[in-house]
Amino acid sequence: MTAINPEKYSEPLHSREDDFEILQRAVRDAGALASSYFRTAPKAFRKADGSEVSEADLAVDAALKLDLTTRRKDYGWLSEESPDDRSRFKHARVWMVDPIDGTGAFLRELPEWTISAALVEDGVPVLGVVYNPSTDEFFHAIRGAGAFLNDEPIHASGLSTLEGARMIASGGLFKKKIWEEPWPNVTAQWVNSVAYRLALVACGRGDATISLTPKAEWDLAASAVIMEEAGGIITDHLGNPHIYNRDNPKFPSLVSSGLALHPALIERTSRVDV
């Protein structure tokens, strides 16, 4: 199933600015709720796919869903911690949420988790918020209006060559035997939350991030609009754009950087069979 065209639907579309006000208030409240669980040894469970989920994830998911869907009854909903409500395909706009991205870091009491929330319209993220309450970093973007960290404009790196690139990714990735030729001298920093990794690249603290494992729409939607509004680009390993609100909300991979560096990354990653 492909993304929907909002022109086919009669539901009213609120202004993006009004929607952002609702979203940013909801995420800040959710951050306070999540923080009340942080470093208190919350209960944790294993999901069917083996990934971790905590009582904090579920509480934040419930709070965000109640807040956002109550205020916008005509919008769809897709979240990591909610059953996939297929009625989202009937809506022009869809909230996409990862209530705690980086649950592993959250449970290990590391300040590398975020709340990631976006609004997607016609398959494209138009609003994005990535909030790290532990570090008081609030990244946001409205499509067409720039990207910001704590209300200060941010910009992706202008680096154009791989030599010396700062990768927000697993260092082991660049040493694997999957590459046709060795990588030049790059540094790597691991960050548990993929949304946070992208936000750090968007604000220039890293030059790129790569992941050759599947990512869900809720992982990337918020940081995608932040990245693009910061002058960067986000695609799969073949250079294809990510399209949102699809039947299967999974992408095969992630490659993101400033515009100048992206071709050199894709030249390497496109040769890898994922």
Image (tube, rainbow, N blue to C red):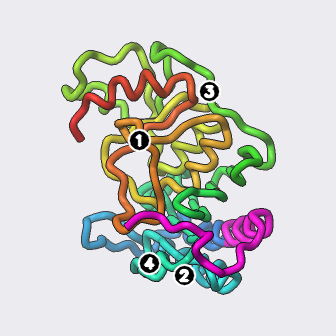
- The CA distance from mark 1 to mark 2 is 33 Å
Left or right position of 217 against 260: left
Q: Residue at x 56, y 63 (%)?
A: 122
Q: What is the x, y in percent for residue 30?
A: 64, 71
Vertical comparison of 267 with 138: above or below: above
Q: Which residues are magenta?
A: 1-29
Question: Which callout, 2 or 3, points at the residue further toward the start of the chain?
Answer: 2
Choose between 177 and 38: the one closer to the eye. 177
Question: Which callout, 3 or 1, points at the residue further toward the start of the chain?
Answer: 3
Classify the position of the C terminus by image quarter: top left
Q: Secondary structure at mark 3?
A: loop
Q: Secondary structure at mark 1?
A: loop
Please give the residue where the numbered disc 4 appears in the rendered image: 82
Please give the residue where the numbered disc 2 appears in the rendered image: 62
Please give the residue where the numbered disc 1 appears in the rendered image: 240
Q: What is the x, y in percent for residue 71?
A: 70, 82
Say whether residue 3 is magenta.
yes
Left or right position of 175 against 233: left
* Quadrant hosting residue 203: top right
Q: Residues within 10 Å of mark 1 (few under 14, many from 20)?
A: few
| Identity, as a three-letter code, of the amino acid under mark 1 | Asn
| Identity, as a three-letter code, of the amino acid under mark 2 | Ala
Say whether residue 67 is magenta.
no
